[in-house]
Amino acid sequence: MRKYCTMILSLSVLLFLLAIAPDQLVHAEAKDEPANLYQVTSDHLNMRTNPDIEAAIIGQLVAGNKLRVFEEKNGWYKTFFDSQPVWVASQYLLLLEETSVEATSDAADETKTKAQETKEPKESAQSVTEEEPPTYSLEHATEGIINLPQGFLKANDMQISENAIVVTKDQLEGHRILVDAGHGGKDSGATNDGVYEKNLTLLTAEEVAEQLESEGATVQFTRNNDTFISLEKRVNQSNTENIDAFISFHYDYFNDPAVNGINTYYYNEKTSAQLAKEIHAALMENVAMNDRGVRHATFYVLKNNTKPAILLELGFMTNPENLKKIQTEEYRKSVAKAITDGLVDYFDAK
């Protein structure tokens, strides 16, 4: 009989623990801090389906937009748009400090409340209602709240300013561009004062790809990380895939530090001369650098390329003024805009 009672008691305890466990989990997860609020600092920030530079773009943010971040992964932040997760590059977001609306109430109201508490009798536990959660003041935020997908406990509101989503333009829609970041991996390219050409070319290729995709182009990379890719493989990718233009990015080096400026190179007069002229003209219009002109050259990636192909030397690492400028995000954005404008003019003229 005692053994039977013990079994009944143990089973009751187990059922009680199982009954309260979900509630404990909910309460524990509900204590999570609100997602941080960030502001966009870039003029054009693409929202992608995955944390990858080659992932599909589903919209754009512009400078001044605000959004909440729920996860970080390899330099990308996850937020939500239209109840779907989207990813944006973290380097273009600035963390904001939020001010609770409650904190802005008058000191007189606070004093009045305290005075009432001392005069009024305490309410019974049954009559006390839960306090309203604090609300946050978001400048220029929309009134509508985009619902988060199911699975979040006490999910935070995700708000984006009115002009957050920009309809992607389509001036380059249907065109496929192969961007070639020169050097990489064991091939560092030119170096000066701890600056490696291979790093500058990759940053430039990524910025250009962002701009091109914002205009509807499909962009491929010969490399999208610090990897060595042979010249043969770069050319083979261009020749065997459906590519409309091949653009190779480089930064120059010379023994005379006074030499500076931008060169645009091409090899095939029939397929590439016009592309070189349009891109170079746009560079000179958008980028404050010395004009070294458009030149014919026998670089491997140009001579062996069957597609319209150019190679850009976007400044001299041996020139102090050029070296300082080419390391800035502002410079890369100017280059990206110029190349985008040049490609639009090139395809429009065909």
Image (spheres, grey):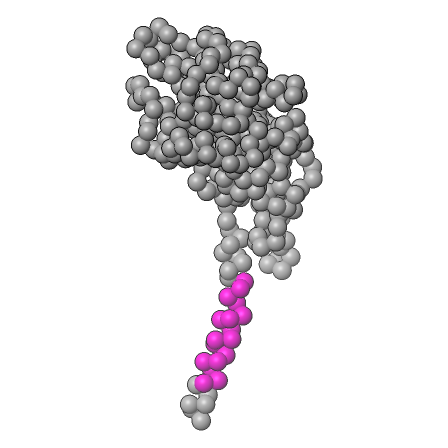
Question: Is 295 on the left or on the right of 64, as rendered?
Answer: left
Q: Which residues are magenta?
A: 7-23
Question: Is 20 on the left or on the right of 349, as rendered?
Answer: left
Q: Position of residue 98 (x, y in %)?
A: 54, 34
Give the number of marks: 0
Q: Residue at x 53, y 53 (%)?
A: 30
**Residue situated furthest right in the rendering:** 144
Q: Residue at x 51, y 23 (%)?
A: 309
Q: Is residue 96 magenta?
A: no
Q: Quadrant of residue 102?
A: top right
For the N terminus, the image quarter is bottom left
Q: Quadrant of residue 67?
A: top right
Which of 8 and 84 lies nearest the eye of the viewer?
84
Q: Is residue 22 magenta?
A: yes
Question: Is 137 on the left or on the right of 229, as rendered?
Answer: right
Q: Residue at x 53, y 17 (%)?
A: 269
Which of 134 and 294 lies nearest the eye of the viewer?
294
Q: Residue at x 63, y 27 (%)?
A: 172
The answer to whether residue 296 of the structure is visible from this angle is yes
Q: Position of residue 307 (x, y in %)?
A: 53, 27
Magenta stretch: helix, strand or loop mostly: helix
For the C terminus, the image quarter is top right
The answer to whether residue 141 of the structure is visible from this angle is no
Residue 108, relative to residue 10: is it above or below?
above
Q: Position of residue 155 (x, y in %)?
A: 58, 49
Which of 103 and 334 lies nearest the eye of the viewer?
334
Which of 61 and 229 lies nearest the eye of the viewer?
229
